[in-house]
């Protein structure tokens, strides 16, 4: 056991009154503002770093993790004792290091990061044992007073392995008292067993599909990284439909064969029904799922099974990275370019970047997969930090779709209509051929804005700087930022005029109306996060499309990724300019990625596909790059622009978001912070400025943006900066390192 002698960092080290005699340790509780606190270890109790313990904290009992030696910053006479050690496998060293690292990088307190790793408090209790019953071989049955139910139970147990009470009762029709009686007289034994892990071991003997030469080579390269051992980061860069999933299944199999655990991060795990089916086909079992829709009991079992190592493969959203792995051997981040990997509240972290760190700390390989890798990742490839494995063609006979541009200034839709004559004609042809089509419009609801034609009043959210979106299906106006809802009125609340309220612009519901009117004989379905909620609904939608119960699918970005529909040959992008507006740092990149993903849904079977982009700006380089299929040219221009402005990946960014309920307090705090803003070479601080969402969920928001050269130690700089200002408790200061949202 570690000694608890005073160390040099101990404030009381030279004061004999404070000589430490008992053992002390630091314990980190999973609380948003907490760091590790010192505790005494009672006599006769032995603890080691990583142990889950129960501690007194204030007036409450808390649970935490032994983080290491005592810090020695509190008078030992005032320390309290830990209550005891919980029956949970200790948290691995690497997990604790990871939490410390993420905390230092994101500037979130360690307790806030630990909270993500301890999100299921119940899991810390030992699982309830289960009882099984079996015949006692020593028992002399002749001495037993026999009754028909007893006879049935004994006969049943003679034929079966130890069984649980419920099963015995159901099979024999006997009552619980019968079993109780048999146990009392000694005819039957009650055995206590630990419940088995709910996760079966993957079947590693299922033969792999025949991989193409190119796929084989890629799979071998990834498996070689695993054989090499140690850390490596490989970009698996393959066009949509090239079989990236089949390829990264091979290193997964290899890692599982070594007895290691594997985690796969997917951006929209709840909608990944097709991915899960492929996993089942390849490995014969269900993976352990980890995302917000997994129920509480299942979460508890999963957390424990990950901690004891019996869950071998975890598939999850970004939070799966913080599970307490027993022995993680490989990480895969699919669709690594996805912005959904950035968590925007609480601990603001990018799960892809943290995954690379986790792999580094664990000294294991990581695979990043994408058809449209992020510029950050491509820069790392270029710098030789990441390896590069490419898949240049689609699997089988499928070829990449051809892309056509429709200039909506020439080829005009009718008033309050959004489908151009050209697209309409192509849709008609597609349906006539018995094929399927998809219309992509990244806007939920009926119309993004409602306007009074009499007085010009616009419906705005009372809590946010945002218009209310009409959802005609529910008869409501809704804020997409805070969820505020109001009944859609008949009269204008401002001027009272009736029948003058007009929807402006299209949402998917409005597009649906147009599609049904234009093609009365075809079957149209809308898919957005409003109606496709969760894996079940997604799986049912996929079945309907596969069974060709749907001719035209209208949807938002939830349709952009992953889905594979062989009969879908035409994709119409209704407003290709939508993502380009707003002009944040990554608008062009993100738009390029999204449109490429959407386009990638077309022509995945043996019929070739077409993508039609409706745009008012055909000369835009994003539109041109997609039409030309020239990713490298696009990235080159984008990278050189970022270089010119010292933007990521060539420089570093951070944001400060100052928010509160009172506008004057927020302004005052922002002004004070601004007054002591750091200056220096290779550094630029912008702000304070009202955030584009200057009111969000009832909080006023001001922003600072910090741009720095790569050599600047951003966290230390911000730490120093903020330590110079005191802000009132009612004002929150959030630090966003590597921001992806500029709202
Ligand atoms: P990507 O993720 O690169 O877009 P997928 O992994 O989804 O591509 O593969 C596209 C489709 O091709 C999937 O239906 C997949 O099952 C199929 N596929 C890919 N490679 C093979 C293979 N070697 N054998 C059989 N089917 C394959
Ligand atoms: Zn709102």
Image (cartoon, helix red, strand yellow):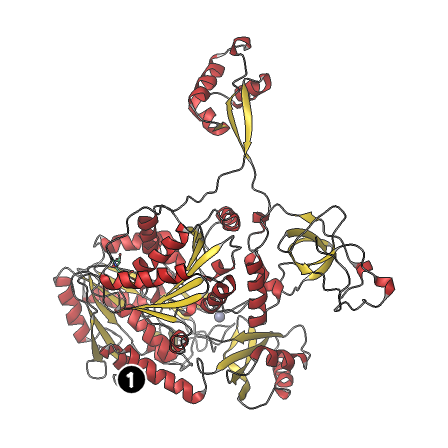
> Looking at the picture, how far across and down is residue 287, in whole percent?
40, 50
Question: Does residue 738 sit above or below 211 in this rendering?
Answer: below
The front one of 558 and 321 is 321
- Residue 657: image location, x then y, percent: 56, 77
Q: Can the viewer see residue 218?
A: yes
Quick one: which residue is furthest to the top in this view? 142
208 and 141: which one is in front? 208
52 with respect to 641 (left or right): right
How would you rate the neighbour count of disc 1 (Cα within 10 Å): few for under 14, some for 14-19, many for 20 or more?
few
| Residue carrying label 1 | 620
- Residue 708 lies, with reference to residue 16, above or below; the image says below
- Relative to 152, 623 lies left or right: left
Q: Residue at x 58, y 49 (%)?
A: 89
Q: Quadrant of residue 193?
A: top right
Q: Is residue 86 left or right of residue 297?
A: right
The x, y position of residue 600, in whole percent, is 26, 67
Q: Position of residue 672 (x, y in %)?
A: 65, 85
Locate residue 711 relative to residue 420 in the image: left or right: right
**Does the residue tagged 1 have its C-beta within 8 Å of any atom of ligand 1?**
no
Q: Is residue 490 visible?
A: no
- Establish if 536 lies above or below 166: below
Q: Residue at x 57, y 63 (%)?
A: 97
Query: How many numbered circles are shown?
Result: 1
* Residue found at the very far front of the displayed protein: 228
Q: Residue at x 42, y 43 (%)?
A: 200
Q: Secondary structure at mark 1?
A: loop
Quarter of the image holding residue 199?
top left
């Amino acid at each position: 056991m570690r000694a608890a002698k005073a160390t040099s960092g101990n404030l009381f080290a030279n004061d004999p009154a404070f000589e430490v005699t008992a053992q002390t340790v630091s314990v980190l509780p999973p609380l948003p503002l907490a760091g590790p606190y010192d505790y005494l270890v009672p006599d006769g109790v032995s603890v080691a770093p990583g142990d889950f313990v129960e501690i007194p904290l204030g007036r409450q009992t808390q649970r935490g993790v032994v983080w290491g030696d005592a810090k020695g910053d509190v008078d030992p006479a005032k320390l309290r004792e830990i209550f005891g050690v919980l029956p949970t496998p200790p948290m691995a060293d690497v997990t604790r290091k990871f939490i410390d690292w993420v905390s230092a990088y994101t500037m979130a307190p360690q307790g806030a990061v630990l909270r993500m790793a301890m999100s299921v408090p119940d899991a810390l209790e030992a699982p309830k044992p289960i009882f099984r019953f079996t015949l006692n071989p020593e028992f002399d049955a002749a001495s037993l007073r026999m009754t028909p139910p007893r006879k049935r139970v004994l006969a049943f147990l003679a034929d079966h392995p130890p069984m649980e009470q419920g099963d015995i009762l159901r099979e024999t029709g006997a009552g619980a008292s019968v079993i109780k009686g048999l146990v009392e007289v000694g005819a039957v034994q009650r055995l206590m067993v630990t419940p088995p892990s709910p996760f079966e071991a993957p079947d590693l003997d299922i033969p792999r599909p025949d991989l193409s030469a190119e796929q084989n080579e890629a799979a071998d390269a990834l498996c070689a990284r695993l054989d090499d051992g140690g850390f490596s980061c490989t970009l698996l860069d393959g066009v949509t439909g090239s079989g990236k999933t089949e390829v990264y299944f091979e290193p997964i199999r290899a890692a599982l064969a070594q007895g290691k655990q594997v985690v796969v991060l997917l951006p929209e795990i709840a909608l990944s029904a097709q991915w899960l089916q492929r996993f089942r086909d390849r490995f014969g079992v269900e993976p352990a799922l980890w995302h917000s829709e997994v129920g509480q009991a299942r979460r508890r079992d999963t957390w424990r099974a990950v901690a004891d190592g019996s869950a071998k493969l975890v598939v999850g959203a970004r939070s799966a990275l913080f599970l307490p792995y027993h022995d993680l051997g490989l990480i895969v981040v699919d669709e690594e370019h996805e912005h959904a990997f950035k968590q925007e509240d609480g601990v603001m972290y990018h799960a892809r970047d943290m995954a690379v760190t986790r792999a580094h700390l664990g000294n294991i390989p990581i695979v990043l997969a994408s058809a449209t890798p992020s510029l950050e990742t491509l820069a790392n490839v270029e710098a030789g930090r990441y390896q590069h494995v490419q898949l240049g063609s689609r699997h089988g006979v499928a070829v990449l779709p051809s892309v056509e541009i429709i200039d909506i200034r020439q080829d005009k839709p009718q008033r309050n209509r959004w489908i151009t004559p050209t697209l309409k004609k192509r849709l008609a042809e597609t349906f006539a051929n018995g094929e399927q089509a998809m219309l992509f419009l990244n806007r939920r609801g009926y119309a993004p804005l409602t306007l009074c034609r009499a007085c010009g009043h616009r419906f705005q959210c009372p809590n946010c700087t945002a218009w209310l979106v009409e959802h005609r299906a529910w008869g409501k106006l809704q804020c997409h930022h805070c969820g505020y809802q109001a009944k859609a009125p008949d009269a204008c609340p401002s001027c009272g005029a009736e029948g003058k309220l007009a929807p402006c612009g299209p949402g998917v519901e409005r597009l649906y109306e147009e599609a049904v009117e234009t093609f009365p004989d075809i079957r149209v379905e809308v898919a957005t996060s409003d109606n496709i909620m969760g894996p079940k609904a997604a799986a049912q939608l996929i079945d309907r499309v596969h069974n060709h119960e749907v001719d035209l699918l209208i949807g938002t970005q939830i349709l952009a990724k992953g889905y594979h529909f062989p009969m879908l040959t035409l994709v119409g992008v209704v407003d290709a300019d939508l993502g380009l507006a707003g002009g944040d740092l990554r608008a062009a990149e993100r738009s390029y990625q999204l449109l490429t993903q959407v386009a990638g849904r077309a022509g995945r079977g043996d019929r070739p596909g077409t993508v039609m982009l409706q745009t008012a700006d055909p000369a835009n380089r994003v539109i041109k790059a997609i039409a030309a299929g020239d990713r490298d040219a696009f990235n080159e221009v984008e990278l050189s622009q970022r270089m010119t402005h010292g933007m990521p990946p060539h420089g570093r960014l951070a944001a400060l978001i100052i928010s509160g309920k009172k506008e004057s307090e927020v302004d005052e705090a922002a002004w004070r912070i601004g007054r002591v803003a750091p200056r220096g070479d290779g550094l630029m601080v912008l702000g304070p400025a009202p955030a584009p969402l200057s009111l969000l969920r009832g909080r006023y928001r001001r922003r600072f943006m910090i741009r720095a050269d790569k050599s600047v130690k951003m966290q230390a700089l911000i730490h120093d900066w903020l330590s110079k200002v005191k802000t009132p408790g009612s004002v929150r200061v959030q630090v966003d390192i590597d921001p992806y949202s500029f709202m």
